[in-house]
Image: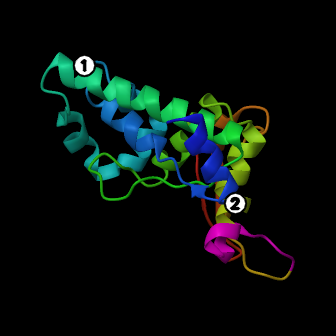
Amino acid sequence: MSDQLAGEMARRNVKLIPTLAREEADLEFSKENNRYLSDPLFQACAGDRLEELKRQRSAADKSEAETFQRSFDIAIQNLSKLHAAGVQICMGTDTGFRLKLPGYSQHRELALMCRAGLSTSQSLAAALQNNYEFFAHSASKIEPGQPADFFLVKGNPLGRIEDTTKIREVWQAGEVVGNVSV
């Protein structure tokens, strides 16, 4: 991506949903030693799909794995460049790709945004504030007297974005729906 294009996107107030988690999933599932499969949160989110996912291997040969690595590296570099240019980043992951796990992919997306140079607070703002502004969806806004959807974590995601995975309680429409220990 050229600096000129990044600057033009910022000037035109383009919003970006990078979908880095999709690139990372393709890369991880192309490896013999896929670290996703040993991640407790991945295992919890996979549920009944875990055995099926263990059998998945995207890359038939080394050249495909190298292609996935290049694509992932380019995606990280592009996000870094677009963020530096002032493009507003929102949060989401591609839907419909076979390796997406709702929940897990969003946590990976936050961590990957940080890897690309966003601060933890900027990554969280992309997922919450920027998404609210872009999609005008009340699920990402918490106001007095309104039902809220959120989760409580152990730790401080502002200090360490991976703490978003330490989910302790889930609230939906202002009510606790579960205590979790992942």
Q: Is residue 4 visible?
A: yes
Quarter of the figure with residue 31: top left
Left or right for 124, reference 79: right
Disc 2: which residue: 130
| Closer mark to the observer between disc 1 and disc 2 | 2
Question: Residue 167, percent across and down?
Answer: 63, 47
Question: Residue 96, percent across and down?
Answer: 30, 58
Q: Which mark is residue 32?
A: 1
**Label 2 element class:** helix
Q: Residues within 10 Å of mark 1 (few under 14, many from 20)?
A: few
Quarter of the figure with residue 68: top left
Numbered label tally: 2
Q: Which mark is residue 45?
A: none
Quarter of the figure with residue 59: top left
- Residue in the image at 53% along x and 29% along y: 77
Q: Nearer the viewer, residue 60 or 144?
A: 60
Residue furthest right in the image? 144
Disc 1 from disc 2: Cα separation: 37 Å
- Residue in the image at 20% along x and 43% along y: 52
- Residue in the image at 74% along x and 44% along y: 122
Residue furthest front in the image? 4
Q: Residues within 10 Å of mark 2 (few under 14, many from 20)?
A: many
Q: Amino acid at mark 1?
A: Glu
Left or right for 110, reference 20: right
Highlighted range, magenta: 133-144
Residue furthest left in the image? 60
Q: Nearer the viewer, residue 20 or 10?
A: 10
